Image (cartoon, rainbow, N blue to C red):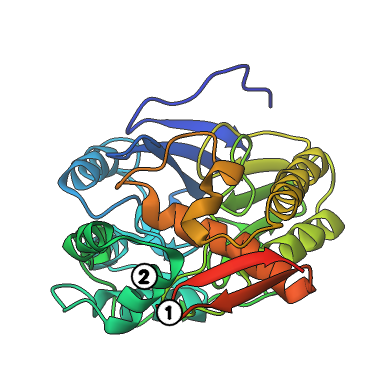
């Protein structure tokens, strides 16, 4: 099926493959939508990803459930990974529909962990993490003011779930969807591959126009998520047919997975090369933003930019191409070996 720019409007559905419908859900950000997927087998239906736990998404779901899905029996809600636009309505939908929640273990447990930050004090570990990256006192105050926002968009999670595991083929909507696990963007991201229909639900692991955020966070300050992400690109290249229909969380469905995987790999290796070229003298994390981002980094984007910069820097340190030194003020300085 060729789309030629066609897409559903917010809260509308469109068939993209036999038994698979595309539901577009609005988001309150610059990235203003998420694609959700409905797997149908007659009246039976499985939902893949949920939207944010906001009134706008709840109202949109109310309209869909009373409209296109009014005669459906919805047995399962699948969440590809923990981020609020994917998991935010999970508890609300599961409770309303009496459905089962399916997630990988690491994603489900990380949601439960992050919910404990709601209305909690900012951990000293997090303040040390961003101070080491070069945040000023004023920037740390801004971070503290926005701490614990996960619970604003994911108001809760079901207290039980069914586990998705690598290589399993659960029957969702009349099809055997093989679970492929990607890492780097999130801990244990589930992609769903139906080999018979040649369709991949890729979540954020493979997007048509942008790279998903790959970041280091204060909960695991020494992580190397970019290494995980590049390994996942290799895995997907080995597992996916070139002509598979990719159903991403953002942007239109597309074919040409191998070309897109190569472009993502080059995007990150180009950034790594730029960091090395410009790091003959020591720099803090915040000093590297100009190498990595085309837009100006401000209070809204500084935390994610820091995480992504650290992901690239840690990758180079682990490879042995770069060195990280900590000064007497506990700020980390990176330079080429």
Where residue 290 appears, as percent x and y from the top left, is: 55, 42
Q: Is residue 120 left or right of residue 293?
A: left
Q: In this view, does 322 lie above or below 39?
A: below
Residue 287 x, y percent position in the rendering = 51, 52
Q: Is mark 2 on a helix, strand or loop?
A: helix
State the image quarter where residue 3 is shown. top right
Q: Distance between the residues labelled 2 and 1?
A: 8 Å
Q: Which of marks 2 and 1 is in front?
A: 1
Q: How many marks?
A: 2
Helix, strand or loop status at disc 1 = loop
Q: In which quarter of the image is the C terminus?
A: bottom right
Which of the pair 143/103 is nearer the observer? 143
In this view of the protein, which residue sits in the foreground, 295 or 78? 295
Q: Residue 131 bears which disc, if any?
A: 2
Q: Is residue 105 visible?
A: yes
Residue at 41% from the left image edge and 42% from the top image edge: 297
Instruction: Identify the mark nearer the N-term, 2 or 1.
Output: 2
Q: Residue 330 carries which label?
A: 1
Q: Residue 53 carries which label?
A: none
The foreground one among 3 and 69 is: 3
Q: In the rendered view, tell whether residue 70 sits above or below residue 285.
A: above
**Label 1: few (<14), some or many (≥20) within 10 Å?**
some
Whether residue 197 can be seen here:
no
Q: Are marks 2 and 1 in contact (CB under 8 Å)?
A: yes
Q: Is residue 325 left or right of residue 318?
A: left
Residue drawn at (42%, 66%) of the image? 82
Residue appearing at x 77%, y 42% in the figure: 257
- Badge 2: residue crowd in 10 Å (few <14, some 14–19, many ≥20): some
Q: Where is residue 210 in the image (x, y as percent from the top left)?
A: 59, 39
Q: Quadrant of residue 280?
A: bottom right
């Amino acid at each position: 099926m060729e789309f030629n720019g066609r897409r559903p409007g917010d809260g509308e559905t469109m068939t993209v493959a036999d038994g698979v419908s595309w539901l577009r859900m609005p988001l309150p950000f610059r990235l203003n939508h998420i694609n959700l997927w409905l797997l149908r087998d007659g009246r039976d239906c499985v939902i893949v990803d949920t939207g944010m736990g906001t009134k706008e998404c709840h109202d949109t779901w109310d309209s869909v459930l009373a409209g296109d899905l009014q005669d459906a029996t919805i047995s399962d809600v699948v969440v590809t990974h923990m981020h609020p636009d994917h998991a935010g309505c999970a508890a609300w939908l599961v409770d309303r529909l009496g459905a089962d929640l399916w997630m990988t273990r690491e994603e489900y447990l990380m949601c439960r962990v992050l919910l404990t930050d709601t209305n909690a004090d900012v951990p000293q570990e997090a303040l040390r993490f961003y101070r080491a990256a070069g945040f000023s006192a004023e920037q740390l105050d801004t971070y503290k003011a926005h701490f614990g926002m996960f619970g604003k968009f994911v108001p809760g999670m079901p207290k039980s779930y069914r586990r998705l595991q690598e290589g399993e083929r659960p029957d969702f909507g009349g099809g055997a969807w093989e679970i492929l696990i990607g890492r780097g963007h999130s801990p244990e991201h589930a992609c769903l591959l139906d080999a018979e229909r040649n369709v991949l639900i890729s979540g954020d692991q493979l997007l048509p126009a942008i790279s998903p955020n790959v970041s280091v966070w204060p909960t695991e300050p020494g992580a190397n998520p970019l290494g995980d992400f590049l390994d996942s690109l290799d895995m997907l290249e080995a597992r996916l047919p070139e002509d598979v229909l990719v159903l991403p969380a953002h942007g239109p469905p597309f074919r040409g997975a191998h070309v897109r995987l190569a472009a993502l790999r080059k995007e990150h290796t180009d950034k790594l090369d730029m960091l090395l070229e410009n790091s003959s003298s020591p720099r803090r994390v915040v000093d590297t933003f100009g190498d990595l981002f085309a837009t100006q980094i401000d209070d809204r984007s500084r935390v994610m930019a820091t995480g992504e910069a650290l992901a690239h820097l840690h990758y180079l340190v682990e490879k042995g191409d770069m060195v990280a030194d900590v000064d007497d003020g506990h700020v980390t300085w990176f330079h080429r070996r």
